[in-house]
Amino acid sequence: QSALTQPPSASGSPGQSVTISCTGTSSDVGTYDFVSWYQQYPGKAPKLIIYEVNQRPSGVPDRFSGSKSGNTASLTVSGLQADDDADYFCSSYTGSNNLAVFGGGTKLTVL
Amino acid sequence: EVQLVESGGDLVQPGGSLRLSCAASGITFSDAWMTWVRQVPGKGLEWVGRIKNKVNGESAAYAEAVQGRFTISRDDSKNTVYLQMYSLKTDDTAVYYCTIGYCTSSGDCHYDDAFHFWGQGTMVTVSS
């Protein structure tokens, strides 16, 4: 199972919005509405910020939103803040032997 | 507060074996399906495998990259899940995390598609 494809980097100024894409295939993102997104700071464990394409776990600000169209999922971070500067990973359920597949990660820089 | 604490990471030679442990607290461990995810430092995440709870037969699933070499088991009396690794390769070098899926307040649990609680990770280095 190939990893999902994410852009290696993204950036935006405080207050702006940034969208990060996550492209899979018809075997994962295109078939299942089980896409999740994670935020990770250096040296720390990932944190779940979006599940089931567009659902936020309790405690995650509504500045984070998710969507999906076809084989591509997207994470939008609105009203960028300094502490949004982190790595972001997407993941999709696959239903195959490799139950979940992750993206390579996107480094979001808040300018 | 949910806590997951991994241990057992070490430097091991290619072809060697290692067993990782993950001790959980703050949850009803016997209900949880436990997943292992690994990450090469500075790189992406990779799903390694998952074990269901006893009610679901404790069945395990593995990534193709580790199938036949890694085994996941659990001891509910110790609130601990294990990752036994055999025939280690240099490509297995990574930080290994144990995780638990996300459960909504209504009890809808996403064990295989949304990883909510994570440990701090334990480093496995395979090198001669």
Image (cartoon, coloured by chain):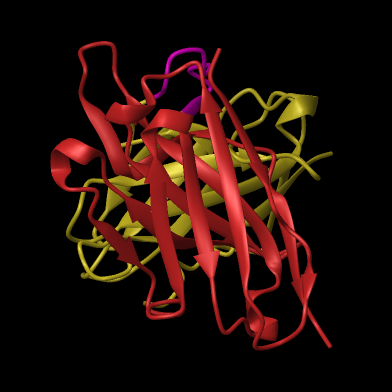
Chain colours: A yellow, B red
Residue B12 placement, left or right of B106: right
Q: Is residue A102 visible?
A: no
Q: Nearer the viewer, residue A13 or A1?
A: A1
Q: Is residue A109 left or right of residue A78?
A: right
Chief secondary structure of the magenta span?
loop
- Residue A37 in the image: above or below residue B85: above
User: Relative to B107, is B12 on the left or the right?
Assistant: right
Is B38 located above or below residue A66 in the figure? below
Based on the picture, tell me whether residue B18 belongs to the magenta stretch. Answer: no
Residue at 37% x, 33% y: name it: B76
Q: Is residue A36 visible?
A: yes
Q: Tell me residue A13's x, y (percent).
A: 77, 34
Q: Position of residue A1 (x, y in %)?
A: 36, 77
In percent of width and height, residue A79 lies at 63, 22
The range drawn in magenta is: A56-64
Q: Position of residue B118 (x, y in %)?
A: 56, 36
Q: Residue at x 29, y 58 (%)?
A: B60
Specify the farthest residue to the front.
Answer: B77
| Quadrant housing residue A40 | top right
Residue closest to the eye, A79 or B125? B125
How many numbered callouts? 0
Residue at coordinates 40% horizontally, 30% vertically from top-left? B77
Tell me the quadrant of the picture where the C terminus of chain A can be found: top right
In the picture, residue B55 is in which quadrant? top left
Q: Does residue B63 sit above or below B55 in this rendering?
A: below
Judge by depth and name the residue closer to the eye, A19 or A91: A91
